[in-house]
C-alpha cells in the first residue's frame, strides 16, 4: 500500500514543500512534487521589522 507524505519547511523568508509517494513494502518512493516560495523580508527601508 502506498502512502503520501507531505513535508513543509517554513522559514523567515521562504516556504518549501515536498509531496512524496512512499511504498513501505518495497522500501521505495517517488517525488510527486516539490518547490519553494521565496519572498522579501518584511522590513521598513530603515530596517525596522514590520511585525
Image (cartoon, rainbow, N blue to C red):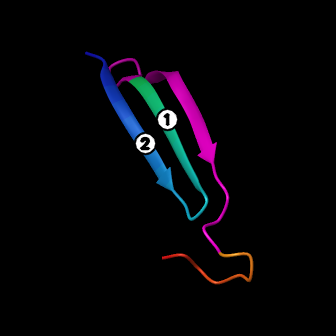
Q: Quadrant of the N terminus?
A: top left
| Foreground residue among 43 and 19 | 43
Q: Quadrant of residue 50?
A: bottom right
Q: Which residues are magenta?
A: 22-43
Q: Residue at x 50, y 52 (%)?
A: 9
Q: Counting other residues with Cα less than 10 Å from the Cα at mark 2, is it few (<14), some (14-19), or many (20 or more)?
A: few
Label 1: few (<14), some (14–19) or many (≥20) C-alpha neighbours in 10 Å? some
Residue 37 as seen in the image, left or right of residue 32: right
Residue depicted at x 55% and y 31%: 34
**Residue located at (55% from left, 61% from top):** 11
Quickly name the residue at label 2: 7
Vertical comparison of 11 with 26: above or below? below
Q: Which mark is residue 18?
A: 1
Q: Is residue 9 above or below residue 50?
A: above
Per the model, the C-alpha gap separating discs 2 and 1 is 5 Å
Between residue 27 and residue 15, name the one nearer to us.
15
Amino acid at each position: 500500500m502506498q502512502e503520501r507524505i507531505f513535508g513543509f519547511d517554513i522559514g523567515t523568508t521562504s516556504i518549501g514543500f515536498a509531496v512524496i509517494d512512499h511504498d513501505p513494502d518495497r522500501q521505495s518512493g517517488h517525488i510527486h512534487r516539490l518547490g519553494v516560495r521565496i519572498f522579501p523580508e518584511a522590513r521598513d527601508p530603515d530596517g525596522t521589522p514590520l511585525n
